[in-house]
Image (cartoon, rainbow, N blue to C red):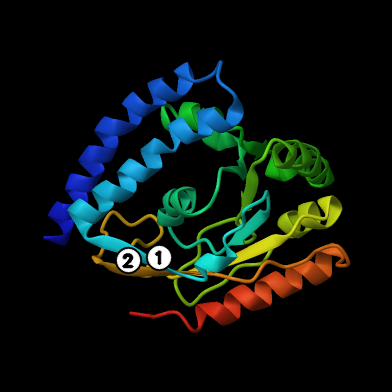
């Protein structure tokens, strides 16, 4: 049954994604925020379809910490789920991502219309310069900036190195950071076709004032909060 329900979700995703990609491309002449609001209808539709087919719901702890002004969101990365849910939970946002994702047919084309910060991970310090330059531009336009500090999805109970990029951007722009922890990997694991029914818990931390923090110190604070919060979330 789990396999069948997961298949139904995949079929719906395969049908809807090319259609929405075409809609996304047609939004090109529109202002960036308006483009975003239209395009994220895809993420909302996928979350709805996920509830219907696979029985995956979610609850939010710390709703009062959701930023009302442009902020930098640093989140745990366990699943494809959070790439959908953060769009529904948080204000308009752009993503820092590897540029290769923009080359994926349909999905990447639509993604390109959301004003992402697409970096070459191999570029080192040049990538940090690009991150700060484009990050300032997106924040000025009213977007939050979403970054997964670990850079890749990790299995429940595991962690990867927290890279400096998100903290670097926050420190250089004096923008507050909102840390986010969740247990989505318990229900939709990395590279897993099977999706298990249940309620994902996402926890939003108190915004961190970055005005007096160096990138390394900020990165440590974010890592400690997220990883400590992960131990308090339900595990299955």
- Which SS class for mark 2? loop
For this orientation, the residue located farthest to the left is 1
Picture coordinates of residue 48, whole percent (x, y) = 28, 49
Determine whether 96 is above or below 188 in the image. Answer: above
Q: Tell me the residue at 69%/45% (across/down).
A: 121
> Residue, x 67% and y 78% (percent of image)?
224
Q: Is residue 175 left or right of residue 84?
A: right
In this rendering, position of residue 144 left or right of residue 193: right
Determine whether, in the image, residue 167 is placed left or right of residue 115: right
Q: Quadrant of the C terminus?
A: bottom left
**How would you rate the neighbour count of disc 2 (Cα within 10 Å): few for under 14, some for 14-19, many for 20 or more?**
many
Residue under pointer 2:
187
Q: Are marks 1 and 2 in contact (CB under 8 Å)?
A: yes
Marks 1/2: CA distance?
6 Å
Q: Which mark is residue 184?
A: 1
Which residue sits at x=67%, y=40%? Answer: 142
Quadrant of the frame with the N terminus: bottom left
Total number of numbered discs in the rendering = 2
Classed neighbour count for the residue bearing mark 1: other residues with Cα under 10 Å, few (<14), some (14–19), many (≥20): many
Closer to the camera in the image, 61 or 51: 61
Compared to residue 184, the image places residue 17 above or below, namely above
Q: Is residue 163 visible?
A: no
């Amino acid at each position: 049954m789990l396999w069948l329900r997961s298949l139904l979700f995949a079929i719906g995703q395969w049908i809807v994604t090319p259609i929405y990609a075409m809609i996304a491309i047609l939004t090109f002449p529109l202002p960036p925020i308006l483009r975003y609001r239209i395009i994220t209808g895809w993420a909302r539709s996928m979350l709805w379809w996920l509830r219907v087919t696979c029985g995956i719901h979610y609850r939010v702890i710390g709703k009062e910490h959701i930023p009302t002004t442009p902020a930098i969101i640093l989140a745990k990365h366990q699943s494809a789920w959070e790439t959908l849910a953060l769009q529904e939970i948080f204000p308009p946002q752009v993503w820092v991502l590897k540029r290769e994702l923009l080359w994926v047919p349909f999905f990447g084309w639509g993604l390109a219309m959301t004003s992402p910060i697409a970096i070459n991970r191999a570029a080192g310090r040049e990538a940090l310069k690009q991150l700060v330059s484009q990050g300032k531009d997106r924040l000025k336009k009213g977007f939050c900036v979403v970054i997964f500090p670990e850079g890749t999805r990790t299995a429940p109970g595991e962690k990867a190195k927290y890279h400096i990029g998100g903290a670097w951007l926050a420190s250089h722009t004096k923008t507050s950071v909102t840390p986010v922890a969740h247990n989505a990997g318990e229900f939709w694991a990395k590279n897993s076709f099977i999706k298990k029914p249940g309620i994902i818990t996402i926890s939003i931390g108190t915004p961190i004032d970055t005005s007096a923090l160096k990138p390394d110190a900020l990165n440590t604070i974010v890592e400690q909060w997220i990883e400590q919060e992960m131990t308090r979330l339900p595990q299955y």
